[in-house]
Structure formats: C-alpha cells, structure tokens
Image (tube, rainbow, N blue to C red):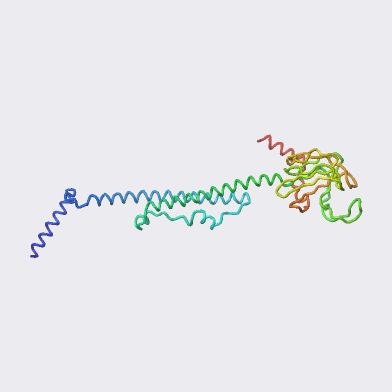
Amino acid sequence: MATILLSVVFILGLIISGNYLIYDFLNLGYDRIEKILNENKELRTQIATLTDKFKQLKSDVEALNAQGDQFRMLVDLPRLSKDELQLGVGGNILNFDANKILYSGSSILDSINLMIDQLSREVNLQKESYNSVLNKYNYNQKLFASIPALKPMDGYYSPHGFGKRIHPVLGVYRVHEGLDIINDVGTPVYATGDGEVEFAGPSGGSYGIVVIINHGFGYQTLYAHLSKVLVRPGTKVKRGTMIAKSGKTGLVSGPHLHYEVIYNGVKKNPIDYFFDDFAINQYLKNYSNKNQNN
C-alpha cells in the first residue's frame, strides 16, 4: 500500500514538473501567477516613481508656503498658522508610500486621489494667500499715498508749536491744535497726501480762508489763514499738488500757514507726520524724476 502511495506521489510530481517545464499544458495557472507577479513588480516600480514625484511636489509646496509667509510679512499680514494650513488642506498631507499601499490592502486609486486632493487644497490655499498679499499690497500703496507725510509749505516752524500755549493775539492759554509755518504771503501751499478737497473758502471764523482735504483711511488735513485757494470742493489732489497760497486771513498776528492733521477725528501733532522735514521742492523733484524713469 505504501509503495502504491509513493508511486502515485512520484507520478504526480513528474506530471506537475513536466507541466511547468512544457508551459502549463494542464492549465494549472503558473503562467498567470508569474504574470501577476511581474505586473505587481511593475506596479511597485511605478508607484515608487510616483512617490518620488509626490515628495518633490510636497517639497515645492512647502517652499511656496515659506515664500508666501515672507511676502505676507512684507505687506504687514500675519503668517498662516498651522491650524489654518491644516484646515485648508483637510488635515495633514498623507505619506504616500508604495510598499504600504501595496501590502495594506487599501485601494491604490483611493490613495492617489486623496494625495491629489490634498495637494490641490494646499495649492488653492496658497493661491488665496497670494491674492490676500496682492490685495494688501494694493491697499498699502493707496494708504501710503494718502497719509499726510510732507511739510505743506516752506518756512520756519517751532517744534513745540502743538499743544497748550499762549495765544499770540488773545494773550491767554489755549490748546493749539496744529502747527504754524511762517513765511511771506503768497507762498505756495501743497497737499501733503492724496485725497479729495472737502472744503475750500472762508471759514467764517478765526481760521480765515481754509482748505480741508479728506485723504481717506481716517485722515484729514486742514490748511488755514490762506490768501487764495486754488482748488474747489470735490477736486481730487495728489501729494504735492499746489492747493493754495499762504496769507494772514482770520485771527493772526502775522503771515503764516496753520496746518492740522486729523486722524479718526483726533487732532495729531503734524511734526509726527513730517518725513524728516522732507522739503516739498525736493519731493516734487524726486517724484518728477521717478515718473520720467518709468
């Protein structure tokens, strides 16, 4: 009996070996298995290549994140926080590993789609961030052009002219809410920032003839004791536009320009807005040269 069993096993072994050697004539599936193994090997190679490409894309996106943070700081925007980054991409970007995908039983297609989705979310987040940077840059350009940042007229002024002082005509202590710049009647007076003329003409009070400019962003400037106005309400002006001539109208002891800076309704010391006492003529020359170069 044992001899018969050994003979059967031997014969089966010969048949199987022969089947393998002569290309699976019994159709036992060796070719299919080998084909599947080869396809599996090729698939792993392709996924490994895809993994390398994904890692490079991920590195590029991280570089964009870092560069985007620098741009945000340049325009006075905060960095994107980790919470914002994770919220924008739907959590941490997965580690796309070829071996884990092949042997974890997970769907390769699902993993690839998740990778693409997360990368797309992060790219979209950076696009939104760059749009915010651009919008803030444009906002800043308008803001900086509108801030009253020049001395409006050539002449002498006291650095202590703002605040409580003895009124030169009335001889009593009063709060002086601006700065007096002394020069001859007829000296040109210039707008100190971009804006729109809100009032131009006699004030009906101690300020005499006045021009008021609304610069937006909470800023206004007032120019008083003028002899002549060169603009009218509604006129759009640029920084350096001549708007009036100085004078001595109103309650004054001599010819000068009374200049005020108002921010959100509060009178500010104009000296704080002078750009190192940058002379108006120097500004106009530099501005003209800049436009010619452009």
Q: In the shown orientation, is residue 151 left or right of residue 46?
A: right
Q: In the shown orientation, is residue 137 left or right of residue 269?
A: left
Residue 181 in the image: x percent, y percent?
83, 46
| Outermost residue toward the bottom in this view | 1
Residue 208 in the image: x percent, y percent?
86, 45
The residue drawn where x is 35% and y is 55% is: 102
The residue drawn where x is 65% and y is 46% is: 139
Above or below — where is 52 with respect to 243? below
Closest to the observer, 197 or 56: 197
Residue 85 in the image: x percent, y percent?
52, 55
| Outermost residue toward the top in this view | 292
Q: Quadrant of the C terminus?
A: top right
Q: State the count of labels.
A: 0
Closest to the observer, 230 or 7: 230
* Image-quadrant location for residue 2: bottom left
Q: In the shown orientation, is residue 29 left or right of residue 280?
A: left
Q: Quadrant of the N terminus?
A: bottom left
Residue 20 in the image: x percent, y percent?
18, 51
